[in-house]
Amino acid sequence: MIYANLVVQRMRDNRPFTPGAGPNGGDFFLPWRELRARFADAGIELNTPDRNEGREVAFELHLNAQRNLPSERPSYTFLYEDPLVRPLNANPAQLARYRLVFTWNEDLIDGQRFRRLEYPNDLTVKEVPGWDGRDLFCVMLASNKALRHPDPRNLHDKRIEAIRFFEAQAPQLFALYGRGWNIPAVQPGAWGRIRKRLHEWRARLQPDLKPFPSWRGSVHHKSEVLLRARFALCYENSRGAPGYLTEKIFDCFTTGCVPVYVGGPRATENIPRECYIDGDAFGSMAQLLQALQGIDEARFARYQHAMREFLLSPASTRYSNAHFCHTLVEGITADLAQLQPQAQPA
């Protein structure tokens, strides 16, 4: 058996392969469980580093670029976070230390050492409720957080703008879900982090305070809400580097909830326009609300049909867990084969 390390933050005891152990509950870690199974098919046992102590380890796979790389074995990385969140993911000197870099970031991809790989998603097509089976008009699922440093590409402020608009103009049509909304909006920078701590302390002392009246609490799995909603405000954390497209829009597709999407440059160029509503196409939140209220049952059904057709089409494959696992396993095992000493002819 060949052993390999998976480095995901500081996780130990094979936590990335544990069902329901991810930060968002549900199957957040499903891609890593499937990846472990695919490596096992190739004769490689993938573990967190603590599980491989005392063993000869063939390689390491890192989620995001890491500062410390082993000198005794090759390393590979999948750049999950945008450089706005993790600047190390765009540091040329650090990335040069990896044998292969897998990334969605079009600024880096060269088809050789830097290979394209999208965020993985469970794109299983399921039966979903239609228009009459949804009791929520519009929702947002997000955490109350901010970028570490102020940046004009930040989209957290746009989320707050949308939340406040609905709370003031159409509170009966909107519900907010996610973590951390029992305190005021988190701000970027050092002072923002200090204010967050102060607000959290105050919230413990005064739990009845509701800075966001639309907040309905956190959820174990996003589908609990998205299966009930007709529309979801689906804003990325930032405009991001070209190619930045996270799971948010696909969570809507697989639950039949029509996303109002706001993201980065060229993020949705490979997704049919009939599958989502472009949030940037409206001059104001009032115009967006008017457009949503103008969508009837027949048009909603057309959106659902387009989303389902996309999920069933070959065009969706690049965003799937299966493609994610195949690309990593094939790329890494082929590279390892090149590192093996060539047999000398007799």
Image: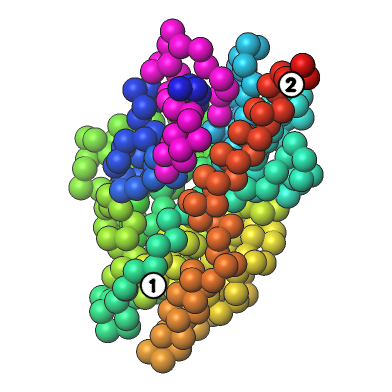
Q: Which is nearer the eye, 261 or 27?
A: 27
Residue sitting at x 32%, y 73%: 128
Q: Quadrant of residue 341?
A: top right
The answer to whether residue 256 shows anywhere in this view is: yes
Residue sitting at x 52%, y 16%: 57
On screen, residue 246 above or below 63:
below
Residue 84: horizontal and vertical position, in percent?
A: 63, 40
On screen, residue 297 above or below 50:
below
Pointer 2 residue: 342
Q: Is residue 200 magenta?
A: no
The outermost residue toward the top is: 54
Q: Which is nearer the eye, 124 or 185?
A: 124
* Residue depth check, mark 2 versus mark 1: number of the one nearer the observer: 2
Range covered by the magenta-colored residues: 34-61
Category of crowding for the residue at label 2, using alpha-carbon neighbours closer than 10 angstroms: few (below 14), some (14–19), many (at least 20): few
The CA distance from mark 2 to mark 1 is 52 Å
Q: Is residue 37 magenta?
A: yes
Residue 113: horizontal and vertical position, in percent?
A: 75, 36
The answer to whether residue 186 shows anywhere in this view is: no
Q: Which three-letter amino acid code belongs to the residue tagged 1?
A: Gly
Label drawn at residue 256: 1
Q: Which is nearer the eye, 343 or 280?
A: 343
Q: Is residue 286 left or right of residue 111?
A: left
Q: Is residue 187 left or right of residue 300?
A: right
Residue 22: horizontal and vertical position, in percent?
A: 35, 39
Q: Which three-letter amino acid code belongs to the residue tagged 2?
A: Gln
Residue sitting at x 68%, y 48%: 116
